Amino acid sequence: MTRSSHQLWRFHGGLKLESNKAISTQSPIVKARLPKRLVIPVQQHIGEAGALLVKKGDKVLKGQVITQSNEYVSAPVHASSSGTVIDIDEYPAPHPSGLNTLCVVIETDGEDKWVELQPTNYVKTKSPAELRQLIRKAGIVGLGGAAFPTAVKVNPGPQAHIETLIINGAECEPYISCDDMLMREYATELISGCGIIQYMVSATHCLIAVEDNKPEAVKAIQTVISEQALHTIEVVSIPTIYPTGGEKQLIKVLTQKEVPSDGFPSDIGLLVQNVGTAVAVHKAVVLGEPLISRIVTVTGEGVKQPQNMEVLIGTSMSELIEQSGGYHDDACKLIMGGPMMGFTLQTDHLPIIKGCNCLLVENKPEETPATMPCIRCGACASVCPAQLLPQQLFWMASSKNFEQVQDYHLFDCIECGCCAQVCPSQIPLVQYYRFAKTEIWSQERDRIKSDHARVRHDFKQARIELEKKERAEKLRKKKELLEKKKIAEAAAKNDTPETEVDPKKVAIEAAMKRVQDKKAAKQTNNTSSDE
Amino acid sequence: MQFKTASSPHIPQQNNVQGLMFKVLLAMVPGTIAMIVFFGWGVLINIILASVVALSAEALMLWIRKRPIKPYITDGSAILTACLLVLALPQLAPWWLTMIGTLFAIIVAKHLYGGLGFNPFNPAMVGYVVVIISFPKEMTQWVPPLLEGYTHLTFTETLNIIFGGDLPLAYTWDAITMATPLDTVKTQLGLELSINEIENHKEYGGIFGSVGGFGWEWVNGLFLATGCYLAVKGIIDWRIPAGLIAALLVLSNTFALYDYASFAPPTFHLFSGGIMLAAFFIATDPVTAATTTKGRWLYGAGIGVFIFIIRTWGAYPDGIAFAVILMNMAAPLLDYYTMPRAFGHSWTEFPHHHKADDDEQ
């Protein structure tokens, strides 16, 4: 029954990895305890951070919006529980850079009291634009890890026609099981969310793709689909090959289509959303709840009771570890995300953010093998899902040949880590690609900056020029005024009945005089006697 | 609690260079044993000699170049080079010849170009070319295979010949050495004999065995078998030997069909000399080969074509080393023109297409 009749394709390369998911799927999702303190970073997404709406000392309710931005690519954040804002300052946040970021610190009052929610009973009474607004207000971002604002993603533009909505439940990284558990336990909400997004983008079909190592999830979804007799939503079991959960790879597997390198899935009539995002959309629209919690897998050989937890955004990682039985003595590495693409954290005193799907604790005292030179074996190229030549990229990146490395499509690299995984010389290839990308970006920034400086310089020159001209003009006008006065004086002296002539005439005469003046610039003093 | 930081991926890697090299070395054992059985102790003596020289030269060069000695000396690449070179040399090659070939391979062809991973030419083949060009006479000192009617040397006798250079009193060079089947075919074809007449000649016909030369069939057969195992395991890329064998097969077959009296049959070409060793163990050296999938087909095929040309019309009895080096030169070019289409890109937006456009402007 779980075997789908849907035709599937293969993407190039990829790896079959030890999944290690079962260690964290033995028990149902556990609700993490309400923490005493929530540290909520204002920037948890791709795009602009919002401006603060609260100040130190403010009382906040659960779900109350605390930042707001007018930028298009942005998402607000909300108070995850009720309490008092005790601090707004820079705090360490989970980010590869390890840098501090602006956070709102809330001391919870234990009441966990919601703001007034506005549920939507009949989704289809609202227009797609209204629904997008709801999603936007709810602060939903892609929960697969990228954290791109969902309201932006579900608005592919008036030209784009979305044929198929793909819901990504592949979860191809080893160890992570939050999507697996979510699909098992929230299948109804998931289907509801899928329906809402499908309606919003008017997609004809919806495919929910799940790797075949999660049969329970497939079964749970299939049951809901059968119960509700849905004909346009289909769950598809796909082969477990890392990184099949990558957006482009998943599209290839399901449709054989390739997203153009410089384009978006919407260019080929597709939209991909993560399963967690779909559930968040359901909550935002149907229940009116903003995104204030997510499911996090706490797992790895270094933690005593691996499990999945429903966690309020801003909860400290250390509390989750504690509630998962604590560390084993030999725990040595804490990773946010999966073992292939996640990044290591120096400490667990960091808040859970919207994009945090997994906390992986490794215990293997990984002896770092000596890196040998590249022997050009090509194993990397044979596993690269982006069909790149990783070893060529490595040579270019290490010799800082940033132009050629782009010719070889460095920016198509999704940093999945397959190449580094199979490299017999143990070269940390992905590190080189990140280095090259960062260098290129910073060069680009410098270029823009210098361009900007040049524009500013040119502008300054132009302004000086303009000022000069204006000064000259002023001087000329002053002179004119003087002339007029003289004319008026002369007219008064003549004392003729035509004194009270039309001022227009006078002006015309004055103008004519001026022309004459210009012709005989030196004879200006004779003008009155000429008359 | 403070944790270690590292760059992703965080799963321990399974492969390492050392492991690859030793698997390749291991796969060479059966064929090498067959060579020792059929062609005497010289093979073993030279392997030991060349390995010692190669490791010493490697250590010396690493020390001079201020590189960590331990990880590189244990990577197995120097021993692999030594073995590949020795298997291509005549069994009674004097010690100094083996040494010169090995030293040149390790010092010049490998380390002066930057060591492991940076050498554009296959070091073993460079070593071979140096000695075959410089010492053609010594390079003919092949022993007859284990056949009745030929002289077979003992271990001590072989040792004396290789290191002393002098023959035991009872022997002459003509008695203990003889031309290889490939060489014989070449010489006798030059004397207007037909392939059939050569293979059935009463004096030397016996060395031709049933397909590619007595003993050689076994050696090649074993290298083929273990080579296939390496290819199946993904330790070497199957496209290179496939391309090489296919090209040699097609060419030799075409010419043999055209004139079977003047051109040796494909079976002879494939199972004579060091073809299977070349196809599976020499040409597959990743450092000096092409790296793209299409490039590897072409690279292998190119070697096959050059081997046929040199064997048939060239001045040397076998052309493997020259063929490999010629294709080593072509490898970067092959890589460039056979670049795969990146995901989400069309065929027309290749770097070289870009470059061509730029040039026009």
Image (spheres, grey):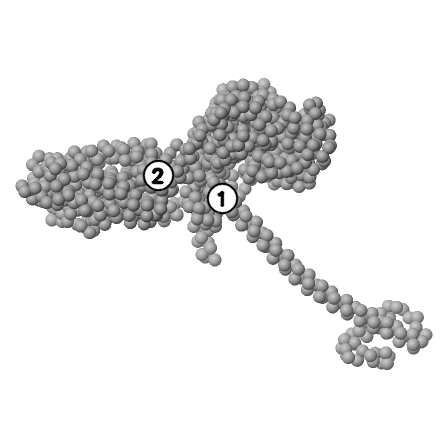
Q: Name the residue under label 1.
A: A435
What kind of residue is marked 1? Phe
Q: What residue type is labelled 2?
A: Pro
In the depicted structure, whether residue B121 falls above or below residue A465: above
Mark 1 vs mark 2: give the one in front: 2
* Residue corresponding to mark 2: B71
Q: Do labels 1 and 2 share a chain?
A: no
A516 relative to B323, above or below: below
Q: In this view, does A480 lie to the left or right of A389?
A: right
Residue A163 image position (x, y, % from top left): 57, 34
B64 left or right of A230?
Answer: left
Instruction: Tell which of A272 and A140 is nearer to you.
Output: A140
Q: Position of residue A18 (x, y in %)?
A: 44, 27
Q: Residue at x 46, y 33 (%)?
A: B10
Label 2: chain? B
Q: Residue, x 74% and y 65% (percent of image)?
A: A470
Mark seen at residue A384: none
Chain letter of the residue carrying label 1: A
Q: Taking A505 as reference, is A395 left or right?
A: left
Asked which secondary structure carries label 2, the reply is helix
Quadrant of the drawing holding the N terminus of chain B: top right
The x, y position of residue A395, in whole percent, is 42, 46
Q: Which residue is drawn at 17% across and 46% down?
A: B139
Q: How many C-alpha atoms fall within 10 Å of the one at disc 1: few (<14), some, or many (≥20)?
A: some
**Residue found at the very far left of the displayed protein:** B170
Question: What is the CA distance from the residue labelled 1 to the residue labelled 2?
Answer: 26 Å
Residue B272 in the image, given as x and y percentages of width and height: 19, 39
- Residue at x 56%, y 19% (from the top left corner): A28
Q: In front here: A56 or A400?
A: A56
